[in-house]
Amino acid sequence: MNNETSKLINNLKNVPAMPNVVIQALNIVKDPNSSIKDLGDIISYDQSLSLKVLNLVNSAYYGFAQQITSITRALALLGMNQAKNIIVAVAMKPMFSSEENKELWKHSITAAVGCEYIAQYLNIMDSEEAFVIGFLHDIGKIILNMQDKTICNKVKELVANGSDIIEAERMFFGTDHAEVGAELAKKWQLPILLTNVIKYHHTPNMASVPKECSLVYLVDKLIQENFNGEVNLDYVKNLNLKLDQPSILRDSILRKADILISELSS
């Protein structure tokens, strides 16, 4: 972590806190002695979360044939990891509630869906773990968006005119969202895999977990509005991706993500 990253985070009066229910869910899923009941207990304790989980499980995104009316039944159908993904997506949405973060939330959901989809498509890692990696990869942007709005707008203007986002952020902030996000992940005590993916998703070749970083790098490119079919092949060669696949994958990801965004927004 460079000095600017440390200074930027330490100067914030209100560093976002990871919702407690998300921390509990992540810990339960990685604990070999835990059960689906443990996950159900933390969801049932929060009536608002319970309702949102049931609404989503009964939505077109999952397409179950029968109406599901209990958290216990929902979790039995979903499994622990998929249930954890719902908790992350639902419980962390308020963190993106400010106007400047609404598009970031949509991007994060789309990236989560994309990482899950491609991980399953290419069979390169646990697809449900990939969802959380995709959702959190840009979490550092929340911190940067809390800075002076004039500076934030200058960065957005540079990026809109074709500048690299990392270079633009470093020019004005002295750091970038990947560095800041990794530091925030450490404060939240997230797993080292997540922290490394957040830090190196723009530079997978520098990461200790290159395959996971390559996955996020690829999805990040695919879901951009101005995607032109080009990706840095050196960054994605370890995914064994065929050259004709990116555009096909993009369309499938965007369709699926639109459904989830619509359901989570209702």
Image (cartoon, rainbow, N blue to C red):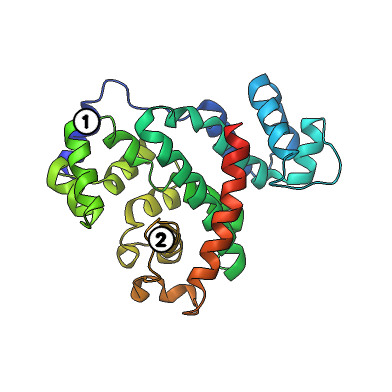
Q: Is residue 170 visible?
A: yes
Q: Quadrant of residue 122?
A: bottom right
Q: Position of residue 111 (x, y in %)?
A: 48, 52
Judge whether 51 appears above or below 112 on screen: above
- Per the image, label 1 sits on a secondary structure element best described as helix
The residue singled out by tag 2 in the image is: 213
Judge whether 9 appears above or below 240 on screen: above
Q: Quadrant of residue 54?
A: top right
For the residue pair 14 and 109, the one nearer the viewer reads as: 109
Q: Position of residue 200 (x, y in %)?
A: 33, 56
Quadrant containing the C terminus in the rendered view: top right
Judge whether 216 appears above or below 186 on screen: below
- Per the image, label 2 sits on a secondary structure element best described as helix
For the residue pair 210 and 167, the one nearer the viewer reads as: 167
Does residue 123 appear left or right of residue 44 in this picture? left
Q: Is residue 35 visible?
A: no
Q: Position of residue 20 (x, y in %)?
A: 52, 26
Does residue 209 appear left or right of residue 127 in this picture? left
The residue at the point 69 percent across, 44 percent down is: 80
CB contact under 8 Å: marks 1 and 2: no
Amino acid tagged 2: Cys
Amino acid tagged 1: Lys
The residue at the point 77 percent across, 38 percent down is: 74
Q: Quadrant of residue 85?
A: top right
The residue singled out by tag 1 in the image is: 149
The residue at the point 41 percent across, 48 percent down is: 137
How many neighbours does mark 2 have within 10 angstroms: few (below 14), some (14-19), or many (20 or more)? many
The residue at the point 45 percent across, 66 percent down is: 211
On residue 30, the disc is none
Judge whether 68 appears above or below 133 on screen: above
How many neighbours does mark 1 have within 10 angstroms: few (below 14), some (14-19), or many (20 or more)? few
Q: Say which label, 1 or 2, has the lower sequence index.
A: 1
